[in-house]
Image (tube, grey):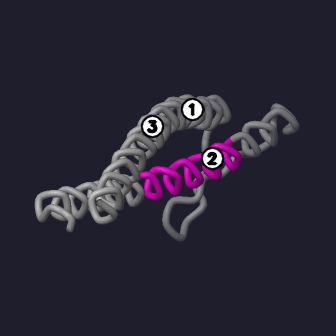
C-alpha cells in the first residue's frame, strides 16, 4: 500500500513539473515572437542598404506616414536589432534553464513513482 505522504509528494512534484512546462512554453513563444521581430528589422536594415542616399524614408505613426531622416531611421533599426538580440540571448538562456529544471523534476516524479510501485508490490 502506498504511503499518503508519497501521494502528496507525487501530486506536488507533478504540479511543479506542469508549471515548469507552462513557463517553458511561454518562453518558447516569446523567443518565436522575438525571432520574428528580428527578421523583420533585419529586412528593413537590408532595404536601407539598397536605397539611394537621396531616397525619402517614412515612418508609420498611427494612421499617418511621417518623413524621417535616414540617419535617424537607420539608428532606430540598429538599436532595435541590438535590443532584440540581447532579449533573444536572455530568453534562450532562460529556456535552457527551464528545460534542465523540467528534466530534473521529471526524473524526481519517475523515481517516486517507481518507489511507490515497489511499495505496492511488497
Q: Position of residue 75 (x, y in %)?
A: 59, 29
- Image coords of residue 121 (percent x, y): 34, 63
Q: Determine which quarter of the picture holds residue 12.
A: bottom left
| Residue at 53% across, 70% down | 63
Which residue is outermost to the front? 122
Q: Which residues are magenta?
A: 24-41
Q: Nearer the viewer, residue 71 or 79?
A: 79
Q: Which residue is mark 3?
A: 100
Indicate the secondary structure of the residue bearing disc 2.
helix
Which label's residue is closer to the chain start, 1 or 2?
2
**Can you tell which mark lies on residue 32?**
none
Mark before the other along the chain sequence, 3 or 2: 2
Between residue 67 and residue 93, name the one nearer to us.
93
Mark 3 burial class by Cα count in 10 Å: few <14, some 14-19, many 20+: few
Q: At 20% from the left edge and 64% from the top edge, which residue is drawn? A: 2
Residue 35: give its label.
Answer: 2
Q: Is residue 25 covered in magenta?
A: yes
Q: Is residue 24 left or right of residue 20?
A: right
List the residue tagged with mark 1: 85
Which residue is depicted at the point 39% across and 60% down?
22
| Residues tagged 1 and 2 counted as in contact (Cβ below 8 A) | no
SS assignment for the magenta stretch, majority: helix
Q: Which numbered mark, 1 or 3, is in the foreground of this view? A: 3
Amino acid at each position: 500500500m502506498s504511503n499518503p505522504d508519497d501521494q502528496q509528494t507525487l501530486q506536488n512534484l507533478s504540479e511543479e513539473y506542469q508549471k515548469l512546462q507552462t513557463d517553458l512554453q511561454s518562453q518558447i513563444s516569446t523567443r518565436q515572437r522575438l525571432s520574428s521581430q528580428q527578421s523583420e528589422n533585419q529586412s528593413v536594415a537590408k532595404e536601407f542598404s539598397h536605397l539611394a542616399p537621396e531616397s525619402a524614408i517614412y515612418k508609420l505613426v498611427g494612421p499617418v506616414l511621417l518623413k524621417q531622416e535616414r540617419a535617424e531611421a537607420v539608428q532606430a533599426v540598429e538599436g532595435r536589432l541590438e535590443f532584440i538580440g540581447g532579449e533573444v540571448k536572455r530568453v534562450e538562456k532562460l529556456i535552457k534553464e527551464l528545460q534542465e529544471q523540467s528534466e530534473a523534476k521529471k526524473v524526481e516524479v519517475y523515481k517516486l513513482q517507481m518507489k511507490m510501485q515497489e511499495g505496492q508490490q511488497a
